[in-house]
Each structure stands twice: as structure tokens, then as C-alpha cells.
Image: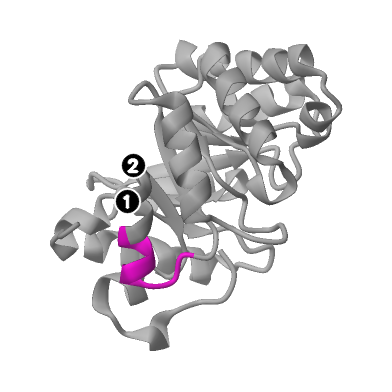
Amino acid sequence: MTLTTEQLAKYIDHTNLKADATEADIKQTCDEAKKFNTASVCVNSYWIPFVTEQLKGTDVNPIAVVGFPLGAMATESEIFEATTAIDQGTEEIDMVLNVGELKGGNDEKVLADIQGLADAVHAKGKILKVILENALLTKDEIVRACQLSEKAGADFVKTSTGFSTSGAKVEDVKLMRETVGDRLGVKASGGIHSREEALAMIDAGASRMGVSATVAILTGDDSHAKAGY
């Protein structure tokens, strides 16, 4: 696939989810996103008021992660976190799947959790992505998680938090795209550090990518690459 730098930027959720990120770090992330006109800036929900203010007057969207990074929060807590972030300016919510309940075969609980978030997010006219954390799942579990996410009304499925044992893999993105068809978006996240890797994810079916190495990917300057997400 051949994309201009401007086209590639619109696939990117420029991400800073580090626990030690300072306000200055978050501002730098926003400044980079504005410079390259990425799709969004993705941060922990605490930072949404600040990010919303930084991105005012641009078409770069604020995104908040919810139940991050483990997905083991009460649904009611996740809904509160999500709706608060939306009220503070976020346009999209990336929630973490309840991995333990999925692996335990408790599909109805997984479905109810996602559906609770989907209903609350959609009631406010916003978008919900479900982070599956593929590193902890078998191929069959990835398929099941995609099917449950679609049944619950999610808008996207997403590969990873970037905080587990591995991030996005091309074969997982292909499997997710095959499972959801063109009905849902697929977001690849975690461990994407070069333009070549980014284009491979898009070729595999990714419609969005979560990366912190945005500057390196868009400029080809590896000195800007950051460890982690």
C-alpha cells in the first residue's frame, strides 16, 4: 500500500498512556498530533480536560482509555469513567475487555460489560473501541472476543493495550478483520515503531493504529521513536 504522509497520519491515534507522563509530556503529544494532523490523541481519562483544551480548533480528536490497562473494573465504574470523559470532551472511548471472564468462558458477562459501555457511549453520540489484549488470548478467543464485541454494539475491536507481553501482530489484525468484516473498525496498537510496520498493519486490515512513535513513523527519523506503546 502506498500512502502519503498526510494520509497515513489520519490512521494514527497518537498515544501517550505512560503512568509517569507529565503535563509537559502530554502537551508535547498534543503538539505533535497537531503538527502532523493525526486522527486523534489517546490518553488516560485524567488528561482529557487538558487534551480537549489543547486540541480546540483542530480536527484532531481526544480519545480516552477506560478500565485501563487490565479491564477488571466494575462495569458501573467504567461507565462513569467513560461518560465523565465524554462530558469533558473526548470523542472516542477505548475500553479494555474483561480478559479473565472471556478466558473463563463467561461470555454473557463479557457481553453485558461491553454492552453497558456501548449503550452509555452511544447515548452520547460517541464511538466505542474494545481492546482485546490478544497477547493473552488464543486464536479462538480472539474470534470470540470480536464476535461478542460486535454483538454488544461496539464500533471497533483493538489488538492490545501495549502494556502486556506483546502488542499488535499482523496475523491477529488479519484474523480480527476476517471476523468482523467491514462491519467494525479494527485498531492495531502496541509495538508499531516504523512506517513499514504501520503499512503492514493497514494492509492486514487495520483502519486505525494506536502508536507513540508517530513522529518516527511519519518522518522516518528513528531518533524520535519511543519505547513502549
In the depicted view, which residue is nearer to us: 117 or 194?
Answer: 194
Where is residue 142, by image quadrant? Answer: top right
Closest to the observer: 192 or 214? Answer: 192
Residue tagged 1: 202
Residue 121 drawn in magenta: no
Tag 2 residue? 207
| Horizontal and vertical percent position of residue 40 | 36, 48
Is 197 inside the magenta-drawn segment?
Answer: yes
Tag 2: Cα neighbours inside 10 Å, few (<14), some, or many (≥20)? some
Which residue is at the far bottom? 223
- The reply to whether callout 1 and callout 2 are in contact (CB within 8 Å) is yes
Q: Residue at x 25, y 57 (%)?
A: 9
The quadrant of the picture occupied by the C terminus is bottom right
Q: Residue at x 70, y 12 (%)?
A: 112
Q: Is residue 213 above or below residue 125?
A: below
Q: Tag 1's secondary structure?
A: helix
Q: What kind of colouring is applied to the model shown?
A: one colour
Q: Secondary structure at mark 2?
A: loop
Secondary structure mainly formed by the magenta segment: helix
Task: Name which of mark 1 and mark 2 comes first in the sequence.
Answer: 1
Quadrant of the image containing the N terminus:
bottom left
Residue 121: percent from left, percent from top: 51, 20
Q: Which amino acid, mark 2?
A: Ser
Tag nearer the camera, 1 or 2:
1
Residue 98 appears in the rendering = yes
Q: Which residues are magenta?
A: 192-199
Q: Residue at x 43, y 70 (%)?
A: 213
Tell me: 52 left or right of 147.
left
